[in-house]
Amino acid sequence: MSKRSLALAAIVLAIPLAAISQAASDEKPATPQATTPADKKPAPPAKEGVVTSSKDQGFLIRQVVRRVPVEVVVTDKQGNPVRGLKKGDFTVREDKKQQNILAFDYEDGSVDSFVPPKIPALPANTYVNLPSVPERGPLYVLYYDVANTGVDDQMFFRSQLLKFVDTAPPGTRIALFANTVGLHMLQGFTTDHTLLRAAINHVKGPGPHLPNVFLLGGEMGGGDTGAALGTLKIFANYLNGIEGRKNLIWLADSFPIPSYFYMDQLALGDQNLDRIKVTFAALLRSQITLYTVNVSGVGAGAGGGARWTGFKAAVDQDNEDTVARYTGGRAYYGNNHVDELIHQAVDHGSSFYTLTYSPSNANFDGQERKIDITLKKGSPYSLSYRRRYFALPESAEQAYNKKDPLHARLEAAKAEDTLCANMEPGAPMLHDLLFSARLSAEGQPQMATADQMLQLADAPAFYRKYRENRPLKPLPPVALQKYRITYGIFDPQLKVLAKHKGTPLSLEFVAAAYDDDGKLLNGLLNEGTASSETKPDGQFAAAFRAEQELQVPPGAKMIRVAVRSKVNNRTGTLEIPLPLKAETPVAIAKAN
């Protein structure tokens, strides 16, 4: 996946809407209901940098709400996570001034955070937004930076990466990305680690893949600070709006971000100064903790044996330590068993406390702020957390990205509605609201009309920048395949709400098709109001049904769908791979 396509993959709410029908489970779909404009969305929760507003007697009050979330890993002398600490055990200071902790939470990576119920066998091309195994811990991104890894080290590390995937803790949600000629998503977030192995071994056929040997590794992009920062910024943009901590594990044998990038050591006039500020501010906003794992090992058989000697080794390790610790992570190096180093990074980032405060210094002028967190006097524990951040004004990043109108639209959409972030290709599955989705292709592809091509022109896969005095020509028509999506909503909370007369069960349905590079091909959002009359049914029988049609251009790899309740903002998402599995006419008739 190219850098640009990854950052622009999910502008769904800008696509024109269509109508959807919905009814009780044992009734035929009702007449399609009118849609609501896309700007009528539930207000997103307040977070760092969000502008909130309220009306009082005709006056509009606007206020920027700033929040700084800091995840703190607390370990004992043996390196084991420390549980049971309270809010009052922590003291937070920013630039030596004590701060008021507004929110406090703890995530224990050794305990399942979600245990899926058992479901019956599903017909072909029917999916439920439930994982196959219990989920636990935060999100993990394996970022294999092949462009900054030498050829010998690549040959050694591939087997180590497979070994880690085969032994990764069950229930860990992992995504895999590789940087060769641009950044590519090889596998989105999944608890099915066999999919990760398949993505690593996929070397032929369509779509992004991990080459057996990338001959330009260590040469193309090696040592390029600007390119490295740009890639980190892509991850920050991609993960922005997805709830919770994300551990980004950077796998390479060179990490081209110099250790002097602290503001109090950075030389004035450095060309990367603004990019450094914007990048690390974006990592904070997206709650990304960075772990660096050097894949070169220490011995001659590891591919980079001589590298870890003398002064150069000390400098490289200092760079890795600095980059990782800035975000609250750690650096791992100097070990032929790289799979064990990845395990250590996963273990370190699995259990943590989250402390959130609003800085007492409200002057966001772009300067660096230092964070100091301590426990009660005499505590024997070690703390790992984000030590510094850049207090950038909200306009700084907007100005930095102003030359990319599609990216600006995506960031604005994410700020307005978290549904945009959760519709990104490869984003983690949401199961706050439970539903099933059956996908079927209807008829043969038909050439798009002029109106349909005009609608597609807004999608990243077809988007073209406007230029002065050079009007854009109409897009040449493409063949569109119609897909019908049949939803079954069996969420127990909605069943309870449906029993209360007068409670309108307003639901939103979103569908989006993506190509191999993660570019949005087409998408739509529909609304419908479910019937409040329900009949008794089994645990996984649909309480409500809905149907949706999506016209998909050629080259689609997946269709991502979402259902959201407008009553309480609960959401469910899942991805359906393409092409569909072959079905007999009897099976199709039975499923419908």
Image (tube, helix red, strand yellow):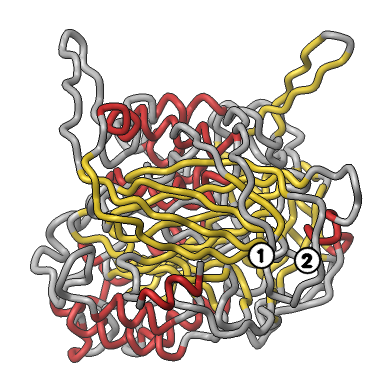
Nearest to the observer: residue 131 or residue 330: 131
Classed neighbour count for the residue bearing mark 1: other residues with Cα under 10 Å, few (<14), some (14–19), many (≥20): many
Instruction: Give the SS element for disc 1.
Output: loop
User: Where is residue 514 drawn, in percent x and y?
Assistant: 34, 52
User: Where is residue 224 drawn, in percent x and y?
Assistant: 23, 50
The residue at the point 62 percent across, 73 percent down is 137
Does residue 105 appear anywhere in the picture?
yes
The residue at the point 62 percent across, 63 percent down is 488
Instruction: Give the SS element for disc 2.
Output: helix
Classed neighbour count for the residue bearing mark 2: other residues with Cα under 10 Å, few (<14), some (14–19), many (≥20): some
Labels 2 and 1 touching (C-beta < 8 A): yes
Q: In which quarter of the image is the N terminus?
A: bottom left
The answer to whether residue 58 is above or below residue 367 is above
182 sits to left or right of 239 = left
User: Where is residue 63 drawn, in percent x and y?
Assistant: 73, 23
User: Where is residue 548 drawn, in percent x and y?
Assistant: 50, 49
Q: Mark 2 points at which residue?
A: 492
Nearest to the observer: residue 187 or residue 215: 187
Q: Residue 434 carries which label?
A: 1
Considering every residue shown, the one lying at the far left of the view is 215
The answer to whether residue 191 is above or below residue 554 is below
C-alpha distance separating marks 2 and 1: 8 Å
Q: Which mark is residue 536?
A: none
Among the 4 quarters of the image, the one containing residue 194: bottom left
23 sits to left or right of 461 = right
The residue at the point 81 percent across, 9 percent down is 59
Nearest to the observer: residue 363 or residue 260: 363
Q: What residue type is labelled 2?
A: Pro
Q: Which amino acid does label 1 sit on?
A: Leu
171 sits to left or right of 581 = right
